Amino acid sequence: MKKEVVIPRLGSSDESDQVKVLRWLKQKGATVQKGEPLLEVETDKVNVEIDAPDSGLLSEVRVQEGEVVTFNSVVAVIEGKD
């Protein structure tokens, strides 16, 4: 089963609806555990780690470091066990 990794809204006080992907903590092909940090993003006010929503194989990375995306964007895909 595939699970999309989505950038959540990181608080109601954010002035912008965009975040910058600072760095990936796991690379494509890595095995990840639910709740494990996957990437770090930067908002107008803070840097935040985004956790894996499920366990499995990080099969797709759709956004590269340095790219800017909006909240609710799909940035990666994890293939879990069915």
Image (cartoon, rainbow, N blue to C red):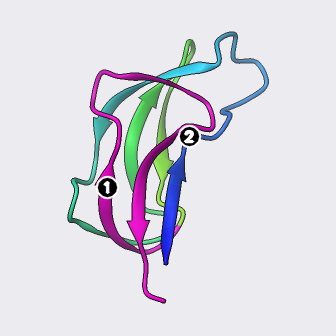
Q: Residues within 10 Å of mark 1 (few under 14, many from 20)?
A: some
Residue 58 position in % (x across, y down): 32, 63
How many marks the image carries: the answer is 2
Q: Secondary structure at mark 2?
A: loop
Q: Nearer the viewer, residue 45 or 31?
A: 31
The answer to whether residue 78 is above or below residue 63 is below
Residue 70, numbered circle: none
Reply yes or no: does residue 44 show up in magenta.
no
Q: Which residues are drawn in magenta?
A: 54-82
Residue 70 position in % (x across, y down): 57, 25
Residue 2 falls left or right of residue 28 = right
Residue at 34 percent across and 36 percent down: it is 63
Residue at 41 percent across and 65 percent down: it is 78
Residue 46 position in % (x across, y down): 53, 22
At label 1, which amino acid type do we have? Answer: Glu
Residue 60, numbered circle: 1
Q: Nearer the viewer, residue 36 or 3?
A: 3
Residue at 27 percent across and 29 percent down: it is 65
Reply yes or no: does residue 59 show up in magenta.
yes
CB within 8 Å, label 1 to label 2? no
Q: CA distance from mark 1 to mark 2?
A: 15 Å
Residue 15 falls left or right of residue 3 = right
At label 2, which amino acid type do we have? Answer: Ile
Query: Mark 2 or mark 1, which is nearer the start of the sequence?
Result: 2
The answer to which image quadrant residue 59 occupies is bottom left
Disc 2 designates what residue?
Answer: 7
Residue at 76 percent across and 18 percent down: it is 13
The answer to whether residue 53 is above or below residue 15 is below
The answer to whether residue 9 is above or below residue 13 is below
The answer to which image quadrant residue 29 occupies is bottom left
Q: Secondary structure at mark 1?
A: strand
Q: Residue furthest right?
A: 12
